[in-house]
Amino acid sequence: MFSANNYETILFDINNGVGTITVNREKKLNALNSQVLKEIKDLLETIHAQDKSFSLKGLILTGAGEKAFIAGADISEMNGMTTDEAQAFGKLGQDVSLLFEKLHIPVIAAVNGFALGGGCEMAMSCDFIYATESAVFGQPEVKLGLIPGYGGTQRLARLVGRNRAKEIIYSGRNVKAEEALTLGLAVKLFPTKEAMMEGVEDTFSKILRNSPLAVGASKKVMNMGNDLTVEQGLGCELQQFAEIFSSDDMKEGTAAFMEKRAPEFTGK
């Protein structure tokens, strides 16, 4: 049976149907080592396999403390890795990022402080990013003779445009919160971590009023469209649009609208 006590480097709790994963290595600025990644992967795989028993309607990813969301991958572990070990370490991080994307529920990254390297990559694998005004993003791997390995070369370009992503990655420079907002990397800023978490909760209160089936289908189609032409993406959209007409949620939503009442969605 699942228990959050199984983990040493992350915390997990559920409140009003929304789960929160907190990377809990505050003294190490929540840096990602193999143990952290394996524990997040195990949790996400459990959510994928047992989503009905969890009854999760949303997920938050954040970091412990005020200084860092995730300051990056743990360099002390990476130092001295062989090519094969680096391949496995990169694959583990990419697997985790893909699991966030493939969850049928919305995932919000709540970024406090540093989100560098692997931290920026994990945030970008979520559906969107809320951040504090003190947040700092970046892909500084080239400064260490490395390149991003958890999806940074791919997701950053999709979020801010290829040439802007190249400039950020080639220079290894930091992107402060205001610039991240301007670029569309973050979608909303807050003065404090407490205010940010309240903002995340407020957004989820709006999302959870809607059909979870429709939200999940929207996420699926939008993510699929990243690798397709507009015409191909429209085909996927049309298929999901038609299929959802057979759902209980669609029948309930349209009936509630006609009857001028609030809908009671079941996700079926």
Image: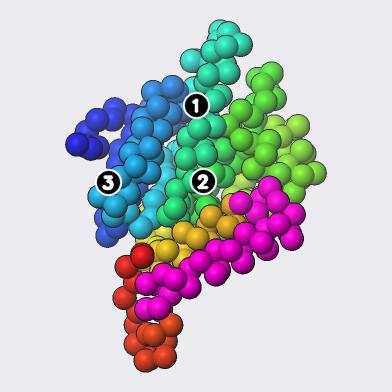
Tag in front: 2 or 3: 2
Q: Distance between the residues labelled 1 and 3?
A: 23 Å
Q: What element carries label 2?
A: helix
Q: How many numbered marks does the figure carry? A: 3
Q: Where is residue 26 in the image (x, y as percent from the top left)?
A: 38, 32
Q: Distance between the residues labelled 2 and 1?
A: 15 Å
Toward the bottom, the furthest residue is 259
> With respect to residue 76, does 131 lie above or below?
below
Residue under numbered circle 2: 101
Q: Can residue 46 be seen in this view?
A: yes
The part of the chain drawn in magenta is 224-253
Residue under numbered circle 3: 13
Categorize mark 3 by other alpha carbons within 10 Å: few (<14), some (14-19), many (20+): few
Q: Is the magenta stretch mostly helix, strand or loop?
A: helix
Does residue 94 appear left or right of residue 228 in this picture? left
Q: Can residue 114 be seen in this view?
A: no
Please tell me which residue is depicted at 55% across the width and 63% down the height of the picture.
240
Q: Distance between the residues labelled 2 and 3?
A: 20 Å
Q: Which of the two labelled residues, at mark 1 and mark 3, occupies the earlier sequence position?
A: 3
Mark 1 and 3 residues: CB-CB less than 8 Å, in contact?
no
User: Type of residue at label 1?
Assistant: Leu
Q: Where is residue 164 in the image (x, y as percent from the top left)?
A: 76, 45
Residue under numbered circle 1: 92
